[in-house]
Image (cartoon, rainbow, N blue to C red):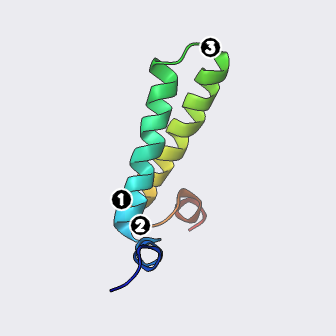
Amino acid sequence: MPSIVDELTDLRGTRPAQAISAAMFLGLGLYNLFYKPGVLALIWGILFLAGGLLAVYKLVVGESIVQSISS
């Protein structure tokens, strides 16, 4: 029976892992934008939301936006 560390290592880099990280980034961005007051929360919300959208783009298209622009 493989250990949990081995299972998590095998999960790393797969599409489900990328989808989980994209959802986490989008969730953190939306939380900071709508539920936390202040300018710093707005900045963090925009950064997390942009990172989440880039992760969703990479998940859907299969390549990063830098690779898409350069080709």
Q: What mark, if any, has residue 60 been given in the picture?
A: 1
Q: How far apart, in angstroms, are the residues tagged by discs 2 and 1?
A: 6 Å
Helix, strand or loop under label 2: loop
**Neighbour tally class for label 3: few under 14, some 14-19, many 20 plus, Cα within 10 Å:** few
Helix, strand or loop under label 1: helix
Helix, strand or loop under label 3: loop
Percent across and percent down for residue 24 are 44, 45
- Residue 14 visible? The answer is yes
Q: How far apart, in angstroms, are the residues tagged by discs 1 and 3?
A: 33 Å
**Nearest to viewer (mark 3 / mark 2):** 3
Percent across and percent down for residue 37 are 56, 13
- The answer to whether marks 2 and 1 mark residues whose Cβ atoms lie closer than 8 Å is yes
- Residue 61 visible? The answer is no
Q: Residue at x 61, y 31 (%)?
A: 44
Percent across and percent down for residue 50 are 53, 40
Dot 1 or dot 3, earlier in sequence: 3
Q: Which residue is the site of mark 2? A: 62
Q: How far apart, in angstroms, are the residues tagged by discs 3 and 2?
A: 35 Å
